[in-house]
Amino acid sequence: MTSNDHEMIIINRTSGSSSSEQRQSKNITGYVFYPKIFGHVHIAKTAGTNINGELASHFERICGHKGFSSDYIEFNHKLRAVTNGVVSHDWLSQKLVQDIYADSFEPGFSRGRVPAHIMDEIGYQDCDWISHEMQWDDWKRIPNFTNNVGIELHVPCRDPIDHLMSQCNFRESTFDCSSKNLTHEVYECLVAMDRFDNRLMNIPSFELKCFNPIPVERYINYMSQFLQPRRIHTNYLSRETNLRRDKEKECLWKNTTILEQVKNILMSQDYYSFCHQCMNSENKLPL
């Protein structure tokens, strides 16, 4: 393993008080646990893979579908070796990293894309931050693993039109602004909207927060004041899942009337209506 693979980073803490400041004020030696466990709803095309990977590279007790702290450094090192440091958008369809998960499950799974039932088998008792790509009601099971410790659930909220265009790009679908059925055009692009439902707000001990995930550095810096740094860090290798977009070819940006109509269609989804309200409320994270 090269010296560049294991490299300390300094994260700028710009929001709130750090764990070290909490320790000093309380005269406590050692890491201070946040009173709640953090959850992250991995909404498709909101940089969830990179957020999960960055946190697992630099902090302890990260438990995500896209990687756990406990074995992420070795996964990252192996991925860098087999890709020469460039992970293209189609990596999900490739059996890139040979590990026990890749050998046991379908191509695309690895320690950097952990099957949900394996996450459940490992359990979440030693997690400070949990990220999942599951249907919304599966979150109701998590308190069974965590002794009913409260969950602060973070929901990423991009600009709705930009988010829609990213989903169209992922599906390699071109949005047709001249279509007489704009609802059909929208639904042709949407990816896994069942990961969020307003009923998440009704789960006991859950508190929902929202944040803009772009750029990811702001969220990573914000979380750094609550999470325990790793003893050994690694430089995270970004994993792309989209082709590069060309906004000049995206018709919605050139037609404000159609754009507003599409926004209204999106607001019929629980996820987009929640984001619209939350991002204009005190529940928006102060990144």
Image (cartoon, rainbow, N blue to C red):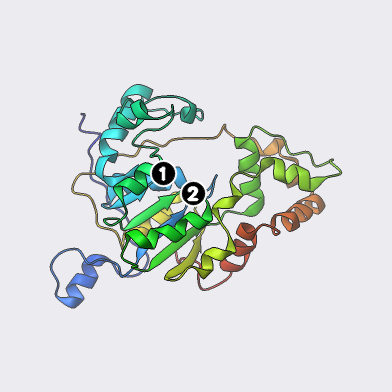
Residue 54 visible in rendering: no
Classify the position of the C terminus by image quarter. bottom left
Residue 251 at x, y percent in the picture? 75, 41
Residue 11 at x, y percent in the picture? 31, 54
To which quarter of the image does residue 205 belong?
A: bottom left
Residue 25 at x, y percent in the picture? 20, 76
Task: Indicate which disc residue 116 carries.
Answer: 1
Residue 51 visible in rendering: yes
Check disc 2 and report the residue beneath it.
Answer: 134
- Circle 1 — which element? helix
Q: Amino acid at mark 1?
A: Ala
Q: Are marks 1 and 2 in contact (CB under 8 Å)?
A: yes
To which quarter of the image does residue 244 belong?
A: top right
Residue 202 at x, y percent in the picture? 52, 70
| Residue at image coords 35%, 67% | 148
Q: Is residue 268 above or below residue 239?
A: below
Mark closer to the chain start, 1 or 2? 1
Residue 19 or residue 101, whichever sits in front: 101
- Circle 2 — which element? loop
Left or right side of 278 for 85: left
Q: Amino acid at mark 2?
A: Met
Left or right side of 68 for 189: right
